[in-house]
Image (cartoon, rainbow, N blue to C red):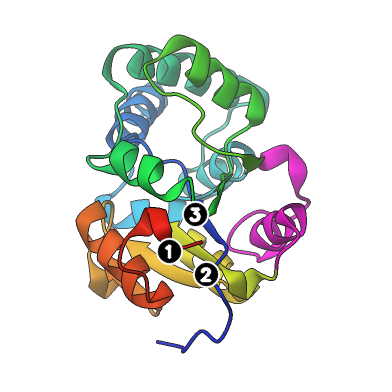
Amino acid sequence: MKLNEHKIRAIVFDFDGVVVDSEPLYEKAEARLFAEYGVTIPESDWRLLKGLSDRDFFTLCKERYGIHEELSILQRKGKRLLEEEFLHNLHYIDGFEDFVREIRPSFLTGLVTSTKRTFLEWIFQNTPIHNHFEMMITAENVASQKPQPEPYLKMAELMQIRPEEMIVLEDSINGVKSAMSAGALTIAFLSSFPKEMFEAADFFAATYTEVREIVLSVTSCNKLFSCI
């Protein structure tokens, strides 16, 4: 764990597995898709695939599992199956809504995701999930996706702060690498993988109650809504 000498001014979230409990829905939709091609993704491979952009995910799967299909067709089929799952089953991670409401008066809030902005907008319009964030960095805003640092460097630039002045919540190995290499104080949120799967992070949390305690300790605040 690194000591942070900067005042924390922002809390930034990944989307899948941090804001919404979507990872099981991705796996279900992708399993349905790949079954059409006689492919079953081994459980051990999911750690390599999570946190990737849509394009990177399907490109890697084509190469890794020998799927002879056009990338655009895989993306289109995958999106349709995912929309079906999201329409009926998407919900927030427990505790997220209360936490984000509590921090909003005191911190900038941001979303950094490899999801395309058009799909995010579809989610906000068609599911119970709402846009709780002041600023967003999506797949279209960067040239290099996670695990590269660019997404979080872009968010810091957008917020007009240093990366060291934000806390990032990430649940994937690629996401944690991205945030840490950008210089942000990083919490590995253990909704998708156990602690042992992460090589390094500044903090680890399995619930938003634990996230809240970490933020309080890092910012030396008594209450999040009075941390200004």
Observer-side mark, 3 or 1, equals 3
Report helix, strand or loop for mark 3. loop
Q: CA distance from mark 3 to mark 1?
A: 28 Å
Do tag 2 and tag 3 residues touch (Cβ < 8 Å)? no
Specify whether residue 201 is in view. no
Taking the image as shown, residue 219 lies to the left or right of residue 28, namely right
Q: Amino acid at mark 3?
A: Ser
Q: Is residue 156 magenta?
A: yes
Left or right of 224, for residue 168: right
Q: Earlier in the sequence, mark 2 or mark 3?
A: 3
- Can the viewer see residue 148? yes
Q: Which mark is residue 177?
A: 2
Query: What residue is pinned by disc 1?
Result: 173
Q: Residues within 10 Å of mark 1 (few under 14, many from 20)?
A: many
Q: Secondary structure at mark 2?
A: helix
The amino acid marked with disc number 2 is: Lys
Q: Classify 10 Å Cα crowding around label 3: few (below 14), some (14-19), many (20 and above).
A: some
Which stretch did the figure color magenta? 137-161
Image: 162 above or below 41: below
Tell which tag, 2 or 3, sits nearer the viewer.
3
Q: Which residue is mark 3?
A: 106
Residue 13, horizontal then vertical, whole percent: 48, 50
**Quadrant housing residue 140:** top right
Mark 1 is on which residue type?
Ile
Q: Residue at x 40, y 80 (%)?
A: 200
- Badge 3 or badge 1: first in the primary sequence: 3
User: What residue sits 26% from the left and 59% below the top?
Assistant: 190
